[in-house]
Amino acid sequence: MKSKVKVTLAIVGTIFISLLLVFVIYKEKNPKEKNIFDEMYYGEKKVYKRGANTPFRNIPGIHQWNRNNFMVNPSVKELSYRNNTVYERYEENYKTKKLGEWRIGFKFIYDEKRINIGFNNKTVKEKLEIGIYYGYDEEKKIFCEEINIYDKELPRGETRIIEISKVKEYLKKYNISIKDLKETADELLYEKVIGDWEKYTNSRFSKDNLGNVKIERSPLFDGVD
């Protein structure tokens, strides 16, 4: 009787190990991170695990805060409990080749399964601000670009300009080339943000291979080479 029990246990154990190996191989070949933005999304979500740090901690220039203790310190300003949101940012502005210095920030909105990446530049004696924004939808695997102008001389609530024709008017008025703006957007996203991610986080992806993601550029850049 004991021998039959041993044989049964051995068979059950073999089946369990086989299933475990199949699961591990499947996870290796089919990771949940389908693209570089998934890596950022799931990497940052580690703040919800006590003692676990996120890949952003490894990137030089990123503001350092107590990510591995946030579960017992919910008052830190990088976190918002109202909408399950986490913030990251570079401490210093990044100087681009053509359009000056830009602030860089990240917003992880886990209730909406989204990442927002923002670049902001103040120009013309700080009366005007240019915003380059990217929104990533983790479920749809879509990465959308948007260009905004902020006119600080307009009444409160009306400062944000998003209509393409009006954005073009502002750029023309202040002698800002759309081509230069497009090249600057590419530099900020691909050379700085993705470049740092690729270099410092052991990413499986790169600026030349973003993975399975659809990029939707701003209509502002249509026809601009």
Image: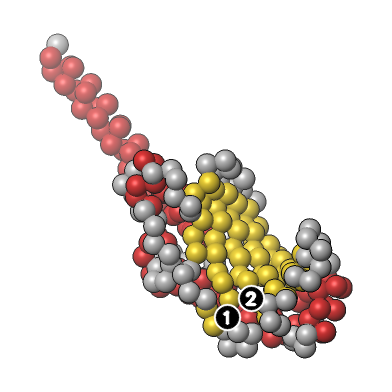
Residue on which disc 1 sits: 101
Which quadrant holds the C terminus?
bottom right
Residue 94, image x, y percentages = 52, 78
Which quadrant holds the N terminus?
top left
Where is residue 14, by image quadrant? Answer: top left
Residue at (53%, 46%) from the top-left corner?
Answer: 80
Where is residue 117, by image quadrant? Answer: bottom right
Asked if the residues shown at circle 2 and circle 1 are in contact, with their CB atoms under 8 angstroms apart, the answer is: yes
Under mark 2, the amino acid is Asn
Indicate the colouring scheme.
Answer: secondary structure
Q: SS class of the residue under badge 1?
A: strand
Asked if one can make out residue 2 in the rendered structure from this viewpoint, the answer is yes
Residue at (49%, 49%) from the top-left corner?
Answer: 79
**From the viewer's perspective, is residue 82 above or below residue 216?**
above
Residue 50, image x, y percentages = 34, 43
216 or 5: which is nearer to us? 216
